[in-house]
Image (cartoon, coloured by chain):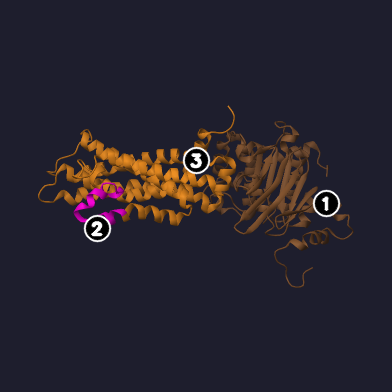
Chain colours: A orange, B brown
Amino acid sequence: MTGYGLRHAARMERIKLRSVRSTWWLAIAAVVSMAATGAGVGLGYRSHTPVATAAQILNNSLGGAIVAQLLLGALGVLMVTGEYGTGMIRSTFAAVPRRRIVLAAKVAVCGGAALTVGLVASFAGYLSGQVAIRGTAIPAASIGEPAILRAVVLTGVYLGATALIGVGIGTIVRHSGAAIGTLFGLLFVPMIVAGLFGASGIAVGRFVPLLMLLNSIAVTSPVPGLFAGWISVLLMCGYAGVAVLCGGVILRCRDA
Amino acid sequence: MGAETPSRSRVVSGFRRPTGLPSVGRVIELRELTKRYGDRVAVDGLSVRVRPGVVTGFLGPNGSGKSTTIRMILGLDAPDRGEALVGGVRYPDLDWPLKTVGALFDAGAFHPGRSGRAHLAALAASNDIPGSRVDEVLRIVGLSDAAGRRAGTYSLGMRQRLGVAVALLGDPAVLVLDEPANGLDPEGIRWVRDLLRGLAAEGRTVFVSSHLIAEMALTADRLVIIGRGRLLAETTVDELAAGGDSLEEAFFRLTSQATDYRAVGAS
């Protein structure tokens, strides 16, 4: 075997990701924000009349993903821009001059980590919602039910994809503040724009990340007019792929 | 020159004489290297051969293109024309870059939130360098006790030592260092000087940039002098000083036509 490959670059990226505090803070914050939202929703519905349905509790307890997506998106952004901002990128590219291998390694490592954290956070949101309604007349939602499990898992995958969109935008924009601003803008602005179209906005809205999350992914059954949850998640992965590919093209022709 | 005994140089670099590459594989060769930034030509048709076994100083006033040249050698910037080769190979085509070329960048090329040890461990992993080598280079540069601290808390001297540790990580036969003495106290400067001379005495190629002629006179054997991106002289310290006047005067004479700016009354 001659020379380094993706395996070596991925080992480097894993050590880099684990060895800065921001990674752990963002991951913990993502899980806590979803757990707190789930608990808050559960507690809020305890004395609600009429008695809430299982679907209402689940859909709302996964709402913390709105915050978690920003935190994990920032994690993805910082994995790239943190290197440009500090000069670390020169050490990285001197060690692995084939830059697309570096990007591929970041995608693999960040994707794996964010998917894991996303699934944990999503499950934490579900679980704390269920714990908070214990002892009330509200029916429990079992994770064994396909519709419940699907919503929890797809929400985790959505969060992983958001982090990869962050990696792509970070590679294109290179500046932490500007990249995080761009990411947040891309997540929120299309939703506002889709709202301007009124009733016909749903034709556009079903392609918009946040609307997909709240109406198709993190719900037991999608709102009519939107795609099925797994199609929405695939769309998110597609967006992530486009962002990363654009980053890869730009990375090659630009001086570090 | 040649004052280092083999056992002394062993202590300095902590490593054996490199045998992996034939000595021709250790030559840095710049061929008509050219880089433009917009209208400004940073490096202009630079052709130089840097040989193993001696310390080659890379001298020039501020803004003369030293850092840009080094960035092109290391594949960070793409030349507009010409090429930079290490042992006949472009840097991006090297199989194990860190085991071939050790680089020191001017100022902190590390993440301040990461410990010195994790920084080295990550880079070692990328080139399949064993983890034991991380502790070894930390010992060589004297950072063992501070290795667990975040690099952002290091003093300037410690940051330079961390950079040197990265350069030595892969036991490379070629070293390229951008202003290694920057920010070091007199003891640190002497340490870098002894280290570089020891590495060259082991048969390695050592290419070190500086804008300080006095320091280079003590460290380097050969000199490559540039101004405004052009080669002004390829010479030795002895030849440069042989003109009769001081080394400093000789340097000013060479670069006087090629400085971007000059204070009133100077020269």
Residue B143, horizontal then vertical, whole percent? 63, 46
**Distance from Cα at disc 2 to Cα at disc 3:** 42 Å
> Could you tell me which chain the residue with mark 1 belongs to?
B
Residue B263, horizontal then vertical, whole percent? 72, 70
What quarter of the picture does the C terminus of chain B occupy? bottom right
The local crowd at label 1, few if under 14, some if 14 to 19, many if 20 or more residues have their Cα within 10 Å, is: many
The structure residue drawn at horizontal position 13% and vertical position 51%, both measured from the top left corner, is A48
Q: Which residue is mark 3?
A: A13
Q: Which residue is mark 2?
A: A196
**Residue B237: image tag:** 1
Residue in front for this viewpoint, B131 or B242: B242
> Could you tell me which chain the residue with mark 3 belongs to?
A
Labels 2 and 1 in the same subunit: no
Q: Is residue A89 visible?
A: yes
**Distance from Cα at disc 3 to Cα at disc 1:** 43 Å
The structure residue drawn at horizontal position 41% and vertical position 40%, both measured from the top left corner, is A111
